[in-house]
Amino acid sequence: MDEKEGEECEEGAKKEEEPDWSIWTDPLEELSEIEDAFELDENGKLRGKAILDIGTDCVKPLYMALKYEPEKIVGINEDFSLYPFESTLKQKSKFFMETDIQFHEFSLFDDERLKVLGVDGKENRFHFVLLYKTLHHLRTGECVARERGPKHRCREDEKCCVYEFRGKEIFDRLFELGERVIVCEAFYPQEKDGDKVRGRGGYFTIKEWDRIFRYLLKKHDVKLIRPTKYSPDSKNAKMELRKIKAKLRQVDYICFYVKK
C-alpha cells in the first residue's frame, strides 16, 4: 500500500467514527417549532403536566424535561434500534432532573400495552399528546396508491403501497390518551418517505390534508401554530379549508394542535 492509499484509509476510518450530531441538534430546532403549541404557566413551565410523545426520538423528551420541567414524559416507539442511547437517557436523567422520563417499545395500536400508561389516577390520560412527523405513519386503511398513480399494482411486500389515513379512527384514539393533540408534519408528496414501513407512511398530499382538516374542523377545536398562528373558524369551514390548502401549497411544514 502506498502513502496516498494509507492516508485515504485513515481519512475513511475517521469519517466512520464521527457521530451523527443531527440526532441531537435537529430536536433542538424542532422544540422551538412546537413550543407555542404547549400551554405554559407564568414561568414558562409545564409543572404538573404529563406528555405522551408518540414515535419519540428519545432526545426531544430530554430537552422538554430540561426546558419545561413537566411531571412526566412518556415516549413510545415501535422500534428503538435507531436510538441505542434510549435506556441510558431513561436511567441517567433521574440523577439531574425531577421529570419522570419513560420509554416503551410498542405500537399506538397495542391496547394491552397502552394500559400501563396512567396519569393522576386516570388511565391512559395525558395533558398533551405529541406527534412529530408521526401522524402519516398511522395509516390503517386500504391501499390508496392508485390515487397517485393509476398504474400502481399492490405487491406482496407492500413496498410501493400507501394506506388510507382514517382521520376519525386515529383522532378518536388519540383523544382517549390525551386532552390536547399536537401534530407537526413535514410533507413532500413528490418525494419518497425514507422511513416508510410497508403501506404505513408516505407523506400526506394536499387532498389528504383537505380530508383531515375537513374532519377536524367539523368535530374539534383546531389552532394552527406554524407556518401561521391562528384559529380557523369552524362555522365557516369551507372558507377556512381554502385558506389552509392555499398555505400548504406554499410551505412543506405544518404544526397545529387539536382539542376535543
Image (cartoon, helix red, strand yellow):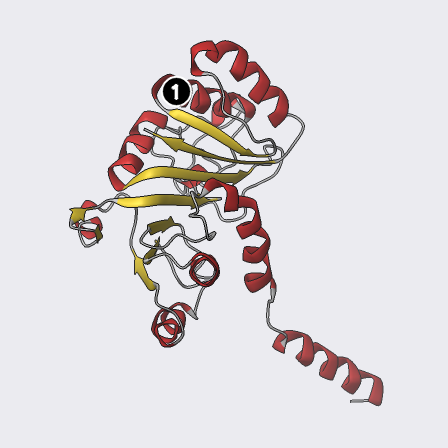
Give above or below for 137 relative to 142: below
Element at badge 1?
Answer: helix
User: Residue 250 falls in which quadrant of the image?
Assistant: top right
Q: Is residue 44 above or below residue 235?
A: below
Determine if residue 199 is in view. no
Amino acid, disc 1: Tyr
Q: Residue furthest front?
A: 42
The C terminus - image quarter: top left
Residue 133 is situated, as x and y percent measured from the top left of the image, at 49, 44
Q: Is residue 191 left or right of residue 110?
A: right
The one of 39 and 11 positioned closer to us in this rendering: 39
Q: Total of numbered circles in the picture?
A: 1
Near-viewer residue (212 or 8): 212
Looking at the image, residue 149 sits to the left or right of residue 13; the answer is left
Residue in the image at 46% along x and 63% along y: 66
- Residue 101 percent location from the top left of the image: 34, 63
**253 or 94: nearer the viewer:** 94
- Residue designated by label 1: 215
Q: Position of residue 118 (x, y in %)?
A: 20, 51
Q: Residue at x 40, y 74 (%)?
A: 96
101 lies above or below 121: below
Residue occupying the point 74% across, 79% down: 11
Residue at the (27%, 41%) spot, across then down: 177
Q: Is residue 125 visible?
A: yes
Position of the N terminus, as image quadrant, is: bottom right
Place of residue 128 in the rendered image (x, y in percent of width and height, measured from the top left): 36, 44
Tell me if mark 1 has few (under 14), some (14-19) or many (20+) residues whose alpha carbon lies within 10 angstroms of its own. some
